[in-house]
Amino acid sequence: MIQTAGIVGLGALGILFGQKLSEALGRENVYVFADRERVERYGKNGVYANGKRCEFTYVEAKDAPTVDLLIYATKYYSLEEAVKSTAGACGKDTIVISLLNGVSSEGLIEELLHPAHLLYCVAQGMDATREGNRLTYSKAGCLVFGEKDNRYSGSVKDLEYL
């Protein structure tokens, strides 16, 4: 059962799905992991989705608590550093997904973290646009995810029912 989530990267997809997770799990259970500078900037300036301030809990990556769901939503060139800096957030039962469309990010995450519950994921159907700290969208789209071997595992079920 997913009760806590961590997000690394607040681009369009990070904000969009972070907002959805905050609504489902509560602000206090959704963490945005970032470096000190970003944590301070996000805390001061906020992040907005369709004009509404997103209520995230910002935590420096080095202090990341273990979460039930860990989401990487960075640019690919930042992924290796992001994974290394948030490795402490990945416990033995943490479900890990990448919102970077394509399959190369999962290989890198698996190599660096060795997560037991890595799901493959692709984001589809959204029209999200981010300008600065503001995201606008009319279609949230969806995440399509599953096991590499197409099994309907407990991890898939947990994420599906979130």
Image (spheres, rainbow, N blue to C red):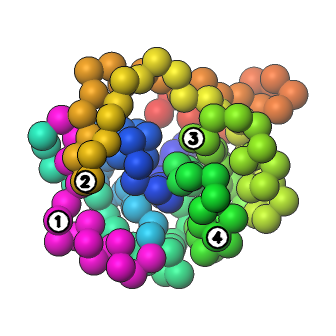
Q: Residue at image x 33%, y 73%?
A: 39
Q: Is residue 74 left or right of residue 84?
A: left
- Which residue position is annotated with label 4? 81
Q: Which residue is mark 2?
A: 133
Mark 3 or 2: the one toward you: 2
What type is the residue that disc 2 sits on?
Asn
Q: Residue 111 location, x and y as percent? A: 84, 59
Amino acid, disc 3? Leu
Q: Is residue 37 magenta?
A: yes
Figure quadrant of residue 68: bottom right
Q: Which residues are magenta?
A: 35-50
Q: Say if residue 11 shows up in the picture.
A: yes
First of labels 1, 3 by sequence position:
1
Marks 3 and 4, the one that precedes in the sequence:
4
| Residue 83 percent coordinates (x, y) | 65, 65
Cα distance in 3D space between marks 4 and 1: 24 Å
Magenta part, dominant SS:
helix
Residue at 56%, 52% (x, y): give it.
75
Marking on residue 99 = 3
Indicate the amino acid at tag 4: Glu
Spatial CA distance of label 3 from label 2 is 19 Å
Residue type at the position of mark 1: Asn
Tag 3, which secondary structure?
A: loop
First in sequence, mark 2 or 4: give its number. 4
Q: Nearer the viewer, residue 132 or 102?
A: 132
Residue located at (40% from left, 62% from top): 32
Cα distance between the residues tagged 1 and 3: 24 Å
Residue 88 occupies quadrant: bottom right
Q: Which disc number belongs to residue 45?
A: 1
Residue at image position (25%, 53%) is 133
Crowding near the residue tagged with mark 4, few <14, some 14–19, many ≥20 C-alpha atoms within 10 Å = few
Q: Position of residue 103 (x, y in %)?
A: 76, 37
